[in-house]
Image (tube, rainbow, N blue to C red):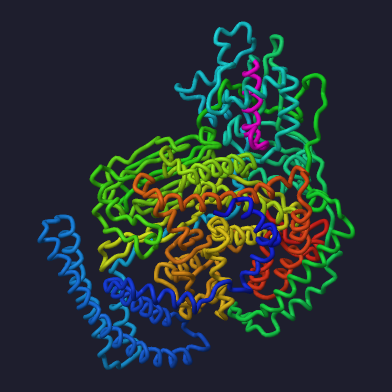
Amino acid sequence: MKSSNIALEFWRNTGGFLRMVALTVAMLYLFVFYSPSAMAMLAAKEHYENRDVGIELMNSVEALRQHTSKYLASFTGKEGDDKLAELNEMRVVLAEKFQRYVSYSVNIIADQKDEAEHALRKQLSEAVKINDVQKVKLFSDQLSMMFKHYHSMMEAASALGQADFNSVTESQELAGKLHQSLASIKLGPAPHQYNSEILPFGPLSSAVHEPAPSVEALQDYLGLLSQSNQANARTVSSYASDPASDMFLQFNEDNQATERLTQLATELNHDPLAIYNYVYNTIEYVPAHGSIQGADYTLFSKRGGAIDQASLLVSLLRASNTPARYVYGSVEVDITQSLNWVGGVRNVEALQNLLGQGGVPNFLITDHNGVAKRLKMEHVWVEAQIEGQWVALDPSFKQYTHEEGIDLNAAMDTDPDQLYAALTAAADVDHENKTVRGLDQAYAAQLVSELEKKVEDYIQLNHPNAKFNDIAGGKKIVKTEAEVLPVALPYISVVASQPLAQLPSNIRHKFGFTLNDNYRNTYLNVEMSLPALAGKTLALHFTPATQADIEMLNAKLPQSESEVTSSNVKLPYGLIQMDAEFLVDTQVVATGNRNFSLGEELNISKGFWTPRFGWEKTDSPVIAGEYQAIGIDYHGIEPSMLADLKAKNAAVSQQLDAGNIGTLTKHDTVGLFLQTGIHSYYAMVNLQQTLLAKSAKVVNYIQPSYGTFSTDLSVSYFFSVPRWVSLSGLGMDVDRLANNAEAANNCLDDWRDYHRKTGAVSSYLENLVPEKMLDDGTNNPQGISAVKTLGIAGQQGQKIYILTNSNQFLLSEIAIDDEARSEINSAIASGKEVTVHEKPISVVGWTGSGYIITDPVTGSGAYKISGGENGGYVSDEMAVYFSFIGFGIGLISTPLLLMVSLLIAGALLIELWLDLMVYDNGSEFCHDMMISLFVVIGLLPFLLGLAGLPIIGFLGLYIGIMAGLVVSRALEVISLIGSRCPNQRPTVR
């Protein structure tokens, strides 16, 4: 087996992972790395070796439904349209062609139905003979539903196919009846539902309440006026006289007493001054409101909001036997200091937007001329009991030095207008209808190579020893070297304040997870605070319910490596029962209150509770039998977490190599691999956002986000009845990728474009990360995401559309499934724009479409692939292995299980992520890694700047993705912004 070190050297020797992400991989619109014809031949061979007439019949029904849907869409038009007469002539021709297609389809479907019915009756007869009650019911249901739907469908299809039309309207009416009949046939699980008001990738709202004007208002907001919280409102004027003084030495989930914290307190000699200086000098401020990480993870991550930094200080003081308490208050602070504090923004609107997106209540105090004088906000600090007196300490309100970095625009020496002309010379660009086809891909590839060389040569000549922050810029805390504790708080004034022994629960963020059926019946429910979950792994998995289910599953699963393929592992629906379990750090914390049939379609509702908005959850489908690793990104993934995952992967790989599998579980293998995947994804997103923000002059902070990396099961339906459950691969579905970001000068255009670009690269990473984790150097797995799908479609010469209210009628030209078509129509109706390609593509067994739903105001987006996934999907032999192992190691033969060692070792590529994550502290990289980073910083802003050229916005997406989408806007565009952007973004209230 290839060692992990060899695998790592393979990637480094091929140019470095970062350059692959930012440049080579970014050329997804330019190259296809597989042969479609070869894949088609393989698919055909597999089809005839594993022929299933039921599936063939359902495929024909689906094809008829898609064609009918597209035909009906052709009737979309506007009265008074100048081209309406021409359109009507075209509809006459379409009606005739569609009638011929339906007549042809009717004959094909009739033949397939007879063959499928014969096979089903044979299976039913065999089940009756052996008195298999479950199979008898399954096959009887399939026959019953086939007759029900088949006769309705064929009646409508025959009426249309044999009609002698008097008008196109009559054809439309008959097609509508056929579509209604076809739409009633369920062909697969429900798609991932989309909420047009909550796009998963993008900024949070900046709407917050005004800071409380009085102690009573603070107590009301904190929930301290209710009887149950009276004890939490207790205040003291003198520690010595308070009989309940030990409350200021107690720990809870916000201010934990972990080994890491107690060890640090010891290292700081339990000295309050040393403790205060450490927190102040070490922990970066994140504009965020509420208890999110808790003390331990804030120390671990070295960043956090005011409340989390207060929790860290309280915890360290209490661990040192120094009584400490929180103080929640409304304060007025200096404008200039505040601008520096939140990231070095240039105006008060940007300041307020950053605080507001993070949920920090704030209000601008102005003079009679409207000039900003002070910022009022709700804030939290700490009081420590020192020599019988409460001493106020604020560890989070601090100042930074901001380093601008080096402008690499001098390395370019290229005219963007000439590039634009060359790229579009042979392209078909329709500005009016917002479509594009056929950009000069060869020239674009040459362009990337030439500009990369220019940047590399420039850096080698002018900055050969530069570190990351020398080039990209950064910020550092202005450290305190005080030898005594502060005598005053760093505010202009304290308007109102409320001391607290512990934080009330209504400012503590929570994560919720429920498992429901499609009728909203809940079978498993978990609610836990984010501080309690920080740094832990979460998962949902299913396990056979009884020994009989274990034996039946074991009998159905293959026992040799060669048998594990997506087509060979087919399990009958409904014959095996599963239990659902929710895990925290592999420990079961909740179980489902009923059994589920393997393959049963269920629904997950998960999300966050926040002090601002209460519960905000997203729904997504899950199939009973899948394994879902759930990842939460708080304010960024830390190298230490990735290092821990790396060590666990190495240990499991060694254990598997040695054949010591007796103590291993599926959580140690497939679970660990999936956890590594979702957290590696977040790490790469964090890195790309950081690079983009630095180059685009945007201040960006990660806010709590969540998503899953899971095994995927596919359920085939026969006339609305689930039939077979098969392995299909791995899926990454990021439900929420949130941030608070603002252009330093509050420019609306820069802010919106930043979110468009980061959303697109985050979408592409949903297929790229699984691909690279599954690649052992020989198999070249291919994943799918919305962005990659659009890229492949562009390579194939398809037309790419940007659909809005003004050109929605063009949706009739696009071949896409009914669920996606409906979602696109709904999105456009709600004011969104949709980027979509002309027709489905096929990649290694997957056929479908990709589309991007974007808010044109904020740049937020939903990056979708057919079937409703908000994410990426990869299906190859390696991915199927993990789906297989997800059923449980106890059911897998030892020789087959040893194959997993190679895959687990593949996860050790996480070391590359670790290399990339150490950039921000100025650490040394290997020389090639540093050059790769600098190429990204210098080259990509220039390429992305082509987005600023006037070509309907789409070329910006095209060139942006080509360039990796890791930085925003061209340096020449940024330089024009100067001191003030003409299109200022308002502050939301």
Question: Which residue is pictured at 89% across the width and 58% down the height?
Answer: 462
Q: Residue at 63% of width from left, 6% of height from top? A: 240
Q: Is residue 438 visible?
A: yes
Q: Is residue 604 left or right of residue 147?
A: right
Q: Of 724 and 831, which appears nearest the observer?
A: 724
Residue 413 location in percent, x, y? 85, 70
The quarter of the image holding the N terminus is bottom right
Q: Position of residue 318 (x, y in %)?
A: 62, 18
Residue lying farthest to the right in this orientation: 462
Q: Is residue 751 above or below residue 920?
A: below
Q: Nearer the viewer, residue 403 or 802?
A: 403
Please identify the quarter of the rendering in which residue 107 is found: bottom left
Q: Is residue 831 visible?
A: no
Quick check: is 167 in the magenta stretch?
Answer: no
Horizontal and vertical percent for residue 591?
Answer: 34, 39
Q: Does residue 418 appear left or right of residue 580 in this picture? A: right
In the displayed structure image, the side of residue 671 where residue 429 appears, left or right: right
Q: Is residue 204 left or right of residue 881?
A: right
| Vertical arrangement, residue 327 with respect to residue 668, above or below | above
In the picture, residue 293 is in which quadrant? top right
x and y, in percent, of residue 34 in the image: 55, 73
Residue in the foreground of this view, choosing between 15 and 688: 15
Write down the region rendered in magenta.
298-320
- Residue 318 sits inside the magenta stretch: yes
Q: Main secondary structure of the magenta part?
A: helix
The mark total stands at: 0
Quarter location, residue 456: bottom right
Foreground residue among 179 and 887 = 887
